[in-house]
Image (cartoon, grey):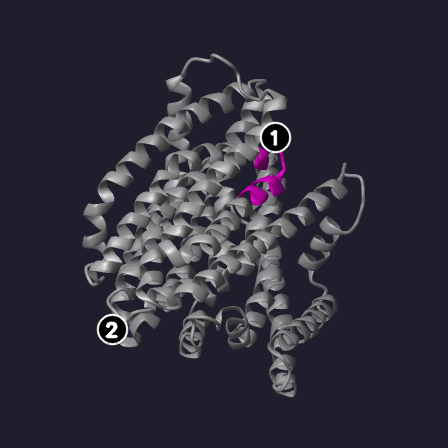
């Protein structure tokens, strides 16, 4: 039933919203205790490389495992495939953990030569703690991919919220005693709790085949698909690391501003962008497994227009309210008004990356459904090279503010290049219909922004939270009304998916 899909989608959006809220709470706690000091810079710098492997395992696993598991179910061997992938992932993630922990004292000083001795020590030790979590992250990744394949999206989100809340709780208890280490230790403990939570849900179902010997041929076959997919996911973290390295050459706090701004601006992508991509992925995989290419193409087109419909007005609305939002969330404790201004300036320049990478997420799902993830590795490699060049040029011109601008320009290149490759791969899409729908959404967003720009001064004397809520509500009403008047097909599609209860054929 469509109603079941709509309910699952709504639950996933709610869970994603809670995940982003918990992530914001974590950043607010870090800002309160450490402000924009070298401690915060070191913590965020240390997290980047382990997080590259975390995303490699989690997001990469979902993109590779969902279609392979659906195929295995068609062959009546889903549990066998799950067991083999789970066992193989334990071995691989354990090796990554050991290597990452052993090598961190060597590469951290090389990557961040401008760090002080104290900052370098924090970065090394925090990196070691995060790499120790990778073995548990790997097991978690397989189980989260399983739940996604079963359209139980919210379970994975709830488990991730557990990890973040444990980090926050650890900071409250121990930040004044052991500083940033409290957050890393909390993350480690939360990852274990998350694994236990998922295992308790699966054990009654007996999803694993006991005493099943390693089938290295099946494991190898899966990882030949998984590795290029995982590397593609890791590209985002590599590009983030590039920006962090360039930012580390500037004043204390630059890395902190970039991370706070990036995490805040990417909230719409994290809630709506990932939601649409996650929900549409099993549908695309099913279309491929049943050889329904027409349905597959329609799913991609609907995904792109739905993503644009939700993300563009959200991004523009945040752009107008950004100073209020950052002041409301972060400006307390060790986080000063000067830090708020600096973070706001960085946030403005990140908006392009949010929109373009969100659209690209739909295109990537198409590649992964077709098991053609390797085709985008070349584009990924070129994006890293372009990001290095752009950062070199723009940071010399704008300082650390060149980092987010580089990310936005690189994201535009990335989505255009990937779309061209995908367009040729599938034999074309309805470009005229896509262009008309994008134009309608853009006009509706422009009308919303124009009205808000002129009426926002009326609320200048109101409290921040009241301003944000009122402007957001007015903006949403204007945008929805304009989209309806322009007869937006993507608006009709989303209303049908989330609100109407019809039997699917």
User: Eyeballing the image, is 65 above or below 496?
Assistant: above
Q: Is the magenta region chiefly helix, strand or loop?
A: helix
User: Eyeballing the image, is 349 above or below 14?
Assistant: below
Residue receiving disc 1: 201
Residue 230 appears in which quarter of the rendering? top left
- Give the magenta part as a residue range: 145-159
Q: Which quadrant is home to the C terminus?
A: top right
User: Eyeballing the image, is 491 above or below 82?
Assistant: below
Q: Which quadrant is home to the N terminus?
A: top right
Residue 294 visible in image: no
Residue receiving disc 2: 396
Residue 294 included in the magenta stretch of the image = no
Dot 1 alpha-carbon crowd within 10 angstroms: few under 14, some 14 to 19, many 20 or more:
few
Residue 244 visible in image: yes
Q: Nearer the viewer, residue 178 or 266?
A: 178
Q: Nearer the viewer, residue 496 or 330?
A: 330
Would you say 244 lies left or right of 204 here? left
User: Eyeballing the image, is 311 above or below 169?
Assistant: below
Residue 152 included in the magenta stretch of the image = yes
Question: Residue 148 in the image: x percent, y percent?
Answer: 58, 37
Q: Label for residue 374?
A: none
| Mark nearer the viewer, 2 or 1 | 1
**Furthest residue in direction front, as rendered:** 177
Dot 2 alpha-carbon crowd within 10 angstroms: few under 14, some 14 to 19, many 20 or more:
few
Q: Considering only order in the chain, which callout, 1 or 2, is on the residue closer to the N terminus?
A: 1
């Amino acid at each position: 039933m469509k109603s079941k899909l709509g309910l699952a989608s709504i639950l996933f959006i709610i869970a994603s919203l809670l995940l982003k809220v918990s992530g914001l709470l974590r950043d607010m706690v870090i800002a309160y205790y450490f402000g924009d000091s070298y401690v915060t810079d070191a913590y965020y710098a240390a997290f980047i490389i382990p997080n590259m492997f975390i995303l490699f395992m989690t997001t990469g696993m979902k993109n590779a495992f969902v279609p392979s598991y659906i195929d295995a179910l068609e062959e009546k061997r889903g549990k066998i495939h799950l067991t083999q992938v789970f066992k193989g992932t334990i071995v691989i993630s354990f090796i990554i953990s050991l290597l990452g922990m052993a090598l961190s004292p060597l590469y951290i000083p090389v990557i961040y030569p401008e760090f002080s001795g104290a900052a370098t020590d924090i970065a090394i030790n925090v990196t070691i703690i995060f790499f120790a979590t990778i073995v548990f992250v790997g097991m978690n990744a397989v189980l989260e991919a399983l739940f996604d394949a079963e359209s139980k999206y919210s379970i994975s989100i709830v488990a991730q919220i557990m990890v973040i809340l444990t980090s926050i709780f650890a900071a409250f208890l121990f930040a004044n005693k052991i500083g940033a280490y409290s957050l890393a230790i909390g993350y480690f403990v939360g990852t274990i709790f998350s694994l236990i939570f998922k295992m308790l849900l699966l054990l009654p179902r007996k999803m694993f085949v006991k005493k099943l010997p390693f089938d290295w041929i099946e494991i190898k076959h899966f990882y030949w698909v998984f590795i290029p997919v995982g590397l593609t996911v890791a590209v985002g973290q590599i590009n983030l690391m590039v920006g962090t390295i360039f930012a580390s050459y500037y004043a204390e706090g630059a890395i902190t501003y970039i991370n706070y701004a990036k995490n805040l601006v990417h909230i719409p992508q994290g809630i709506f962008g990932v939601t649409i991509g996650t929900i549409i992925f099993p549908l695309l995989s099913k279309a491929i497994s049943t050889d329904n290419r027409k349905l597959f193409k329609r799913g991609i087109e609907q995904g792109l227009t739905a993503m644009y419909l939700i993300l563009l007005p959200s991004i523009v609305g945040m752009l107008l309210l950004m100073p209020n939002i950052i002041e409301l969330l972060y400006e307390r404790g060790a986080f000063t008004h000067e830090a708020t201004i600096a973070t706001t300036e960085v946030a403005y320049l990140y908006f392009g990356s949010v929109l373009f990478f969100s659209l690209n997420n739909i295109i990537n799902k198409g590649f992964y459904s077709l098991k053609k993830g390797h085709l985008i590795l070349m584009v990924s490699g070129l994006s890293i090279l372009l990001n290095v060049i752009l950062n070199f040029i723009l940071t010399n011109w704008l300082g650390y503010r060149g980092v987010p601008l580089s990310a936005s320009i690189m994201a535009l290149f990335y989505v255009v290049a990937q779309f061209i490759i995908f367009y040729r791969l599938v034999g074309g899409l309805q470009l005229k219909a896509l262009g008309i729908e994008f134009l309608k959404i853009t006009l509706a967003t422009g009308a919303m922004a124009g009205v808000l720009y002129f009426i926002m001064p009326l609320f200048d004397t109101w409290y921040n939270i009241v301003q944000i809520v009122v402007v957001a509500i007015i903006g949403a009403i204007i945008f929805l009304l304009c989209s309806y008047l322009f007869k937006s097909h993507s608006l009709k599609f989303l209303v049908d998916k989330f609100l109407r209860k019809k039997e699917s054929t």
